[in-house]
Amino acid sequence: MKASRANLIIVSLACLTVVSLAGSSLGTLAWYAYSTRATAAYSGTAVSKTEQLQIGLLWGDKDKASDTTLEETYLATKEVVGDYSYYFMPAGKGFSSTAINYYLSKFGHATNVLPPVTSRAYAGGALGSLYESPVYYHNTEFAVADPSHYVELPFVFRILSTSGIGIEDTDDKSVSSANVWLTDAVAQTEGVKDVSNALRIHVRNHAQAASEAFILNPSAEHQGSTNVSGLLDLNKDGFYDYKRIDGVDKELIYGDHATDETELVTFDQEQEANFSDINQTGKGNVAYDEEERNTFYARHRHDVNGYPSYASAAPRTASYLSFENIRPTEVEGVFSGDYPLATTSVQLTDTGERTAIGRVDLTIWLEGWDHAIIDANIGARYNLGLQFEIDRV
């Protein structure tokens, strides 16, 4: 007998168009562009049917007005539990992609466009804000990302049982102290362009301390980190950006870093002839070729004071886990592990009844500091699939 199962599928994330401002001379510069942004179409999220798992979404505080469209068009039911109101689908019925997109639009989040943003430095725990791409020359400024540039899905789960097991503390046959698990996470690419490695999901189980939250990179084979600072070529001249400071031309570091300028060196003509793979893209320090350059891969201009190595630029990082790190162990349909997505606990409804619900907040974005976010990958098409499961009840 297989465990009950629910699927969350995010499909057809595809780059569509890049729109330039009239009169701009910078052109297309991936997510770092001053005048353009690489964008991705977000076609929807669907939660499949399950007989035992009831799925809802956070609506707001307990006094927030009802929504006619959610109730009449998508057949969701508003419930007040504790201090919050939720919209639940009927047991065994999931949210359609159009219902999810309608919900996201009500909160100003991405529905069909995902411009890359960044978490900045992250070592685990609460996410805080996401941030927009850096602007040419303004290397120390960080603008908070618009909510329409990422997705937030605060899911709530209720596990229903007719067996009587685990429901002694509730009035509605819901199971308390039960976990919901992520049992599959796949990012797929269509065609030769690949930006799937840039997908990030921040996971917060509200039954755990905020410090237990984490970022998931579904394409990673192992846990790791993304460097969230570096030298960039934003004006597309083939050189890492530099600026005259106190009468001296100095290279600019964008993003989160701790710089020791005592390690700056002055580059010469011979060094200028080759790429400097200072951002560790893996391409190496080879002869310069205009066709191979990108935002992360350029040259040091001669007579400019700059950074001879990435270590000298003192980068900070954003840590992430892979799916293999969080995959639960299954024995005869029962899961165990350190990373449940949600855990149900008993709360009171506005009518005084006891019900058991568990909540997980998923924040989904494209991490612009990932080296996949370059001009050559504009137009990439990719899919993200997440699968939730519960034990037999």
Image: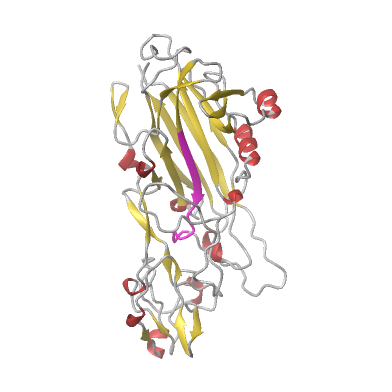
Quarter of the image for the C terminus: give it: top left
Q: Is residue 289 above or below residue 175?
A: below
- Which one is in front, 318 or 325? 318
Based on the displayed image, in which of its 4 quarters is residue 17 positioned? Answer: bottom right
Q: Residue at x 47, y 38 (%)?
A: 361
Q: Residue at x 32, y 49 (%)?
A: 223
Q: Position of residue 158 (x, y in %)?
A: 47, 22
- Which one is in front, 172 or 365? 172
Magenta-colored stretch includes residue 370: yes
Magenta range is: 360-372
Magenta-colored stretch includes residue 74: no
Q: Is residue 333 left or right of residue 55?
A: left
Q: Residue furthest top?
A: 163
Quarter of the image for the N terminus: give it: top left
Q: Is residue 114 left or right of residue 66?
A: left
Q: Position of residue 358 (x, y in %)?
A: 44, 28
Q: Is residue 268 above or below residue 376?
A: below
